[in-house]
Image: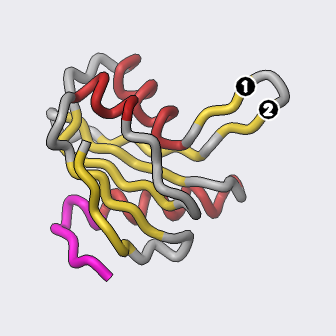
Amino acid sequence: MTELAPEDAKLVTLARATRARTRAAEGAAVRDLDGRTYAAASVELPSLRLAALEVCVAMAVSSGATGLEAAVVLADVDPELAVVREFAGTGVPVHVGDERGSIDRSLSS
């Protein structure tokens, strides 16, 4: 398990609670450059499929954020980081873990 800074541990709590509440396949949370946080679950509808990280980035963009400091994804598969790179560039830490919130690896956009 990877040890996280308190601000990133908060993202884990938000992602875990969102995933559990919605019973979704994925939960994610991001923190923007102003310190605001956004949490979301994956969306799986017949006409719309979005990863939880994609929903978080869309929420940040639609709220006027200009970049990201960090992200957490709780899922059974590695997240696709293209959406983070497109919005926030390279070097954004993306912590990845399981549904219990145990972070086992950190990636970089």
Whether 51 is drawn above or below 94: the answer is above
Whether 72 is drawn above or below 3: the answer is above
Give the left or right position of residue 100, taking residue 106 as reference: right
Q: Residue at left 20%, top 21%? A: 66
Tell which of 56 and 106 is nearer to you. 106
The image quadrant of residue 25 is: bottom right
Q: How is the image coloured?
A: secondary structure
Q: Which amino acid does label 2 sit on?
A: Leu
Q: How crowded is mark 1: few (under 14 residues within 10 Å), some or many (20 or more)?
A: few
Q: Say the numbered circle drawn on residue 8.
A: none
Give the left or right position of residue 91, taking residue 1 as reference: left
Element assignment for label 1? strand
Looking at the image, the residue that sits furthest to the bottom is 1
Q: Name the residue under label 1.
A: 48
Query: Is residue 86 within the magenta segment?
Result: no
Q: Residue at left 21%, top 71%? A: 4
**Quarter of the figure with the N terminus:** bottom left
Q: Are marks 1 and 2 in contact (CB under 8 Å)?
A: yes
Residue 109 pos. (x, y %)? 25, 41
Give the left or right position of residue 75, taking residue 12 as reference: right
Q: Mark 2 points at which residue?
A: 45
Give the left or right position of residue 14, taking residue 9 as reference: right
Q: Residue at left 59%, top 54%? A: 26
* Mark-to-mark CA distance, 1 and 2: 5 Å
Q: What stretch is highlighted in magenta?
A: 1-9
Query: How many numbered markers are drawn?
Result: 2
Residue 106 pos. (x, y %)? 27, 62
Q: Residue at left 29%, top 17%? A: 64
Tell which of 95 and 23 is nearer to you. 95
Element assignment for label 2? strand
Residue 40 pos. (x, y %)? 52, 43
Q: Which amino acid does label 1 sit on?
A: Leu
